[in-house]
């Protein structure tokens, strides 16, 4: 009998991922999540877009139509095996309506900032540091201090009546919720500016961190060493949060069942 201890089986490598919130069979901007995942799969050398589309349609039917869920589509790879598509149907974490944003003082650690998946482990560790520091999210910056986004969120802010977003030429993830906000701003004729800024530029301003899980959350505190900017009031966040909540649409398979 072979009594040799077997080597531990290595965990699969996460090559691409995308998650979204489902509440009683309803979700927001699902087509954008699908398109972003498809692009990340292609960048990782995964299956063709048609294969991803078929996987998406089939697996989406596994998401329950009652309760709150946070599914995650994944492309993983074990060793030299071919990459594999799978869907993890997970209960939704608790949601919050505000953010305490931690400024680490270190530059963005990601190696693939425009694609979700490869850097989730390092971003999870960074966010854990933020929680230890008394915050709920970590801010990512360039080496010379330009603001990028949060570890799990896109960054938006208001300058008087103008809604500002990070210059898309900077290395940021295509934000599904951010793009919904920008589309709504355009529909409401709200001026939008794409710009580069540093931390002091946000002193006293209404700043939002947005993502698919929490929606739109205002920054209510800045946490970090040295002088932190004072958070501004957030009078616009309530109506925009309500509009985001109202944007949920039934999942395709619930429509098929006549629900």
Image (cartoon, rainbow, N blue to C red):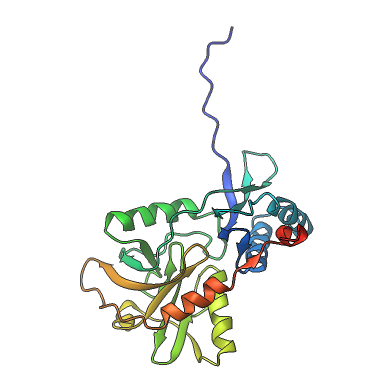
When asked about the image quadrant of residue 123, the answer is bottom left
When asked about the image quadrant of residue 224, the answer is bottom left
| Residue 175 seen anywhere in this rendered image of the structure | no
View extreme (front): residue: 259
Judge by depth and name the residue closer to the eye, 251 or 114.
Answer: 251
Judge by depth and name the residue closer to the eye, 122 or 232.
Answer: 232
- Residue 240: where, in percent of width, then height? 48, 79
- Residue 183: where, in percent of width, then height? 59, 82
| Residue 153 seen anywhere in this rendered image of the structure | yes
View extreme (left): residue: 226
Q: Up-down: is 142 above or below 60?
A: below
Numbered disc total: 0
Quadrant housing the N terminus: top right
Q: Is residue 3 left or right of residue 217?
A: right
- Residue 198: where, in percent of width, then height? 35, 79
Measuring 59% from the left and 53% from the top, which residue is drawn there? 72
Measuring 39% from the left and 89% from the top, which residue is drawn there? 159
Measuring 71% from the left and 52% from the top, which residue is drawn there? 61
Quadrant housing the C terminus: bottom right
- Residue 146: where, in percent of width, then height? 39, 75
Measuring 74% from the left and 62% from the top, which residue is drawn there? 255
Q: Up-down: is 212 above or below 47?
A: below
Judge by depth and name the residue closer to the eye, 23 or 71.
Answer: 23
Q: Up-down: is 140 above or below 15?
A: below
Q: Is residue 237 left or right of residue 89?
A: left
């Amino acid at each position: 009998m072979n009594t040799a201890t077997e080597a531990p089986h290595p965990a699969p490598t996460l090559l691409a991922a995308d998650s979204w919130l489902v509440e009683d069979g309803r979700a927001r901007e699902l087509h954008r999540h699908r398109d972003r995942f498809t692009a990340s799969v292609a960048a990782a050398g995964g299956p063709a877009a048609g294969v991803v589309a078929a996987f998406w349609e089939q697996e989406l039917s596994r998401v329950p139509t009652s309760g709150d869920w946070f599914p995650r589509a994944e492309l993983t790879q074990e060793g030299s095996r071919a990459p594999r598509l799978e869907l993890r149907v997970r209960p939704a974490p608790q949601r919050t309506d505000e953010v305490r944003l931690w400024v680490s003082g270190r530059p963005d650690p990601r190696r693939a900032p425009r694609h979700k998946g490869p850097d989730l482990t390092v971003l999870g560790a960074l966010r854990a540091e933020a929680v230890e520091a008394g915050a709920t999210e970590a801010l990512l910056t360039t080496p010379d201090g330009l603001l990028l986004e949060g570890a799990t969120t896109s960054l938006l802010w208001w300058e008087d009546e103008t809604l500002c977003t990070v210059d898309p030429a900077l290395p940021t993830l295509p934000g599904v919720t951010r793009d919904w906000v920008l589309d709504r701003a355009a529909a409401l004729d709200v001026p939008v500016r794409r710009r580069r800024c540093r931390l002091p530029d946000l002193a006293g301003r209404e700043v939002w961190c947005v993502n698919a899980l929490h929606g739109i959350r205002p920054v209510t505190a800045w946490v970090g060493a040295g002088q932190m900017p004072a958070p501004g009031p957030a009078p616009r966040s309530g109506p925009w949060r309500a509009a985001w909540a109202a944007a949920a649409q039934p999942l395709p398979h619930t429509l098929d069942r006549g629900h």
